[in-house]
Image (tube, rainbow, N blue to C red):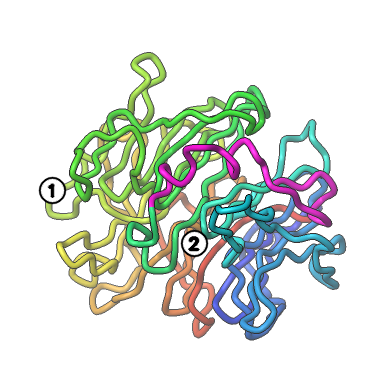
Amino acid sequence: MARLRILVGTRKGLFVLGADRARRKWSMQGPHFLGQVVNHAVLDPRDRRTMLAAVRAGHLGPTVYRSDDGGRSWQESAKPPAFGKAAPGEPGESVSHVFWLTPGAASEPGRWYAGTSPQGLFVSEDAGRTWRGIDGFNAHAQRRSWIGGTQDAPPDGGTLHSINLDPADPRHLYIGMSAGGAFESHDAGETWTPLNRGCAADFLPDPDPEYGHDVHCLRVHPRSGDLYQQNHCGIYRFDRVQRRWDRIGRAMPRRIGDVGFPLVLHPRDPQTLWVFPMDGGTVWPRVPIDGKPALYGSRDAGASWQRLDAGLPRAQAWFTVKRQAMCADALDPVGLYFGTTGGEVWASFDEGARWDCLCLHLPHVYSVEAALAD
C-alpha cells in the first residue's frame, strides 16, 4: 500500500517525513544535501517513485537532482536549467537558483517544468536528466518588460513559480511571477498572454497595469480547472466569463486582511481552499498578525472564511510561511501541512480543524510537498 511522504525543502537540506495512510506514526529520513539550499522537492505522481529536488550549493551553484528509488540515491542533472548565450550587445543572464518544479500531465511521462530566479521557464523531457529553456518565454521580446528590473524584485530575487497545467489540456499552461504577474500559454509555452485584469497593484504608479504584478502563489484546481491566487495585493479567484480576477479576500476579517504567501486547494472540492494570512503593514513584517498564527479556510470559493487555529501557538509566534511551504495530501479527510522559517512542520488531519506539530528544530523551511509513494 502506498505510504504518505512529506518532502520538506530547507535552507540546509531536504528532509522526508513518512507515515502510513492512517497518519498516526511518523518517521523522518535525511537530511539529504546537508548544508545546501533546497528550494523545492517534488515526488512524481505518475510513477510515485521519482523525486526531483531544486538544490543550490554555495560553491557549486544551482542545479536539479533526481532520484528514482524514493530518495535513497541521487544523480545530478547532466544539463541543469541555464539561460542561453546572450546575443551580441545584449546583457547575459545566469540562473541564481531553481525555485519551482512541476511534473507534466499523466499523458506526458518524463516531462517536468522548472521556474528559476531570475524569471525563466525550463522543461525536461527525460525526467529531469537534462533541461532546455522554453524560448517562447525566455527569449520573448517583452520578457524584460514583464519582469522589470532588479529594483522591482523581491528581497531574494525575482522568481518564476506556480507552474500549473490545465487539467483538460496539458498544453495550456499558467505561471506566476514575483514580480511580473500571472501569464498563460495555450501552446505549451510558445506564446504567452498576461492574465492580470482585476488584480490590484498598489505598489505601482498605474493601479491596473497589464503586467508587473506580484503573484505570491497561483493554483489551478486539478479537476475543475478553477484558478485562485494569493497576491501581494489580496486573494483572488478567476472569473472565466469576464476574464478577470475577483478579489475574494475582501470577505476576510478586516483586522486580518488578505495578504500572505501560500494558497492551497482541496484536491477534490474546487470551492474549498486555505490561506495563511501575514501582517501586510507598511513595513511588511511577513509574520502572523499579532504573533498569533492561524489558517483561514473557505468552503464556498471565498465568499466566507473561517479561522482555523486550534492547536497552534496562542501568542508570540513570529515565523513566516513561504509560498510553497504549505500543501494538502489527497487522503480523506484531507491533511494539511505547513513549514515555518523557524524550522517547524505543522499538520492537520481533519482539514484544518485541529493542528499538531510534526517536528521541531529543522532549518528554515522553504517548501513542503505531500505525495503518496510506492
Q: Residue at x 31, y 42 (%)?
A: 235
Residue 220: numbered disc:
none
Residue type (three-letter) at the residue carrying disc 2:
Ala
In the image, farthest residue toward the front: 89
- Find residue 295 and report its horizontal and vertical position in percent: 34, 56
Q: Which of 270 and 257 is in front in this view?
A: 257
Q: Is 354 inside the magenta-drawn segment? A: no
Q: Give me the C-alpha separation between circle 2 and circle 1.
A: 25 Å
Kindly identify the amino acid type of the residue bearing the numbered disc 1: Arg
- Judging depth in this view, the residue of 334 and 302 nearest the camera is 302
Question: What kind of element bears circle 2?
Answer: loop
Instruction: Label 1, secondary structure: give it.
Output: loop
Tell me if mark 2 has few (under 14), some (14-19) or many (20+) residues whose alpha carbon lies within 10 angstroms of its own.
many
The residue positioned 39% from the left and 47% from the top of the image is: 215
In the image, taking residue 164 as reference, residue 313 lies left or right, namely left
Residue 325, numbered label: 2
Quarter placement of the C terminus: bottom right
Find residue 309 and report its horizontal and vertical position in percent.
31, 61
Residue 21, can we see it? no
Disc tally is 2
Q: What stretch is highlighted in magenta?
A: 123-148
Residue 210 percent location from the top left of the image: 33, 32
Quarter of the figure with residue 188: top right
Q: Is residue 128 placed above or below 226 in the rendered structure? A: below
Q: Earlier in the sequence, mark 2 or mark 1?
A: 1
Name the residue at the top extreme. Answer: 241
* Residue located beneath label 1 in the image: 254
